[in-house]
Image (cartoon, rainbow, N blue to C red):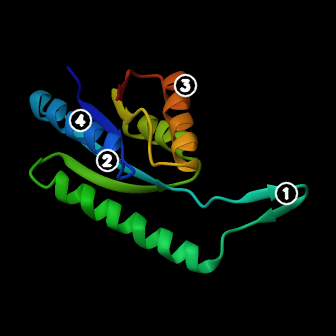
Amino acid sequence: MFTSILVAYDGSELSQRALAKAKELAGEANAKLEVVHVLHHPVVVIGEAVVSPPRSYEAEYIQLTQSLIDQANREIAGLPNAKASLLQGQPADAVLDYAGEIGADLIVIGSRGLSGLNEWVLGSVSHHVVQHARVPVLVIK
């Protein structure tokens, strides 16, 4: 059915569910499974000024990102054709671009990501992926 499955992973409950479903589908079809997390350095634009987060935030964020990749690698350890990768950029665009690069024929993504402001932003990620993907997208609720 599918030969290459890409799953977006941010550590949220819905992305964990998405990963579980992607593992199930990959196992059934003996498909390649790619788990990706996108490192996105947020900036705030106020008028003409661009404000970056403090260095301490950046270091913590990179540490969190590495722990998410490690967690994903533990989750897929038993699958022979699976790997986890770290991407950088705007999350939706990075997922779509990578799906094209690897020839994914299915994208699996949670309907919402983390809580608070991140939930709104990541919810827009899944919406953008659904609207712009050239392959089927399975949205997990």
Label 1 belongs to which residue? 46
10 Å neighbourhood of mark 3: few (<14), some, or many (≥20)? few
Image point (56%, 40%), residue name:
120
First along the sequence among labels 2 and 4: 4
Q: Is residue 38 above or below residue 123?
A: below
First along the sequence among labels 3 and 2: 2
* Distance CA(mark 2)–CA(mark 4): 9 Å
First along the sequence among labels 4 and 1: 4
Observer-nearest residue: 104 or 43? 43
Q: Which mark is residue 3?
A: none
* Distance CA(mark 1)–CA(mark 3): 29 Å
* Distance CA(mark 1)–CA(mark 2): 34 Å
The kind of secondary structure element at disc 1 is strand
* Distance CA(mark 4)–CA(mark 1): 40 Å
Which residue type carries mark 4?
Ala
Q: Is residue 104 above or below residue 52?
A: above
* Distance CA(mark 3)–CA(mark 4): 20 Å
Q: Which mark is residue 132?
A: 3
Would you identify the image quadrant in which residue 46 lies? bottom right
Do the numbered discs 2 and 4 sit on residues whose CB atoms are within 8 Å? yes
Q: Is residue 80 above or below residue 57?
A: above
Observer-nearest residue: 52 or 6? 52
Image point (13%, 55%), residue name:
77
Label 2 belongs to which residue? 35
Residue 104 in sight here = no
* Nearer to us: label 4 or label 1: 1
Which residue type carries mark 2?
Val
The kind of secondary structure element at disc 3 is helix
Which residue type carries mark 1?
Ile
